[in-house]
Amino acid sequence: MITIKPFAFNPFMVNTYVLFDETREVIIVDAACSDQREEELLVNFLESNSLKLVRNINTHCHIDHILGNVFIEERFGIRPEYHPAGDSFLVRAKEVGAAYGFNVERVPEAARLLEDNEMIRWGNSSLKVLYTPGHADGSCCLYNKEQGFVITGDVLFRDSIGRTDLPTGNFDVLMESLQEKLFTLPDDTVAYPGHGPETEIGYEKLNNPFIR
């Protein structure tokens, strides 16, 4: 059974998720730690629970979601995995990071590139990759059917959706991603977003003011 431990990291309060099961193997989703205090929080949690980090997944490559990738590579020897359509954001990561006050010295090479509908496996667990552009090219959600949850990155929030006014954002494409990939999941599927509190798919279908 997968246990999900969330952390809210960096000034953008990105939800970094640590997922592990009975094997004690771990994947991290959106490693967003941006300073020594946040890095120590993450390491202390892993060490105090005897957990072994084995994969680092990015839901998308906006600067606030990738700030911890260098630390994860240097501390654990694990490079990130993301959809190849997100590459354009990594090319400008140093420049964009500086605009927001972050010192992005380099961007680690990908360990591998994710594909739509592939299974991310670790320990006895797995997540299905759902390619969901619209907020940003390369945006993916991560679905576990057995436990009924999905990590939505910045595609879907409680009572909101991802903004579409940034480069590669497109409202119509985002609506298509929501309707075809997320709103076809069971209504009781718990959604863990990239920012803010969790929600449920059925609740958002009925109550989200952006859904048409």
Image (tube, rainbow, N blue to C red):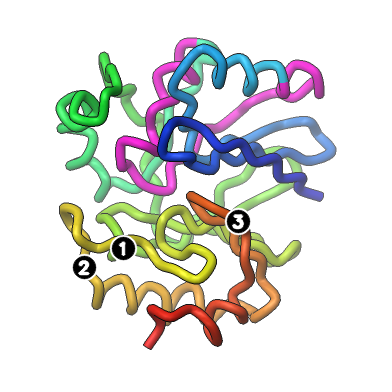
Sequence order check, earlier mark of 1 and 3: 1
| Direction from residue 174 to residue 111 in the image, left or right | right
Q: Amino acid at mark 3?
A: Pro
Q: Residues within 10 Å of mark 2 (few under 14, many from 20)?
A: some
Given this view, does label 1 or label 3 mark the residue nearer the observer?
3
Dot 2 amino acid type: Asn
Residue at 63%, 71% (x, y): give it.
Answer: 200
The foreground one among 17 and 11 is 11
Check the picture and name the quadrant holding the C terminus: bottom left
In space, the residues marked 2 and 1 are separated at their CA atoms by: 8 Å
Circle 2 residue: 170
Q: Amino acid at mark 1?
A: Pro
Label 2 – label 3 distance at C-alpha: 24 Å
- Marks 1 and 3 close (CB-CB < 8 Å): no
- The residue positioned 19% from the left and 32% from the top of the image is 96
The crowd level at tag 3 (other Cα within 10 Å; few <14, some 14-19, many 20+) is few
**Is residue 123 shown in magenta?**
no
Left or right for 44, reference 67: right
Query: Does the magenta-highlighted stretch encompass residue 70?
Result: yes
| Residue 190 picture location, percent across and down | 66, 66
Which dot marks residue 197? 3
Residue at disc 3, secondary structure: loop
Instruction: State yes or no: discs 2 and 3 in contact (Cβ < 8 Å).
Output: no
Q: Are marks 2 and 1 in contact (CB under 8 Å)?
A: yes
Gap in angstroms between the C-alphas marked 1 and 3: 21 Å
Q: Position of residue 20 (x, y in %)?
A: 73, 38
- Which is nearer the N-term, disc 2 or disc 3? 2
The stretch in magenta equals: 45-74
> Where 184 falls versus 87 (above or below)?
below
Camera-nearest label, 2 or 3: 3
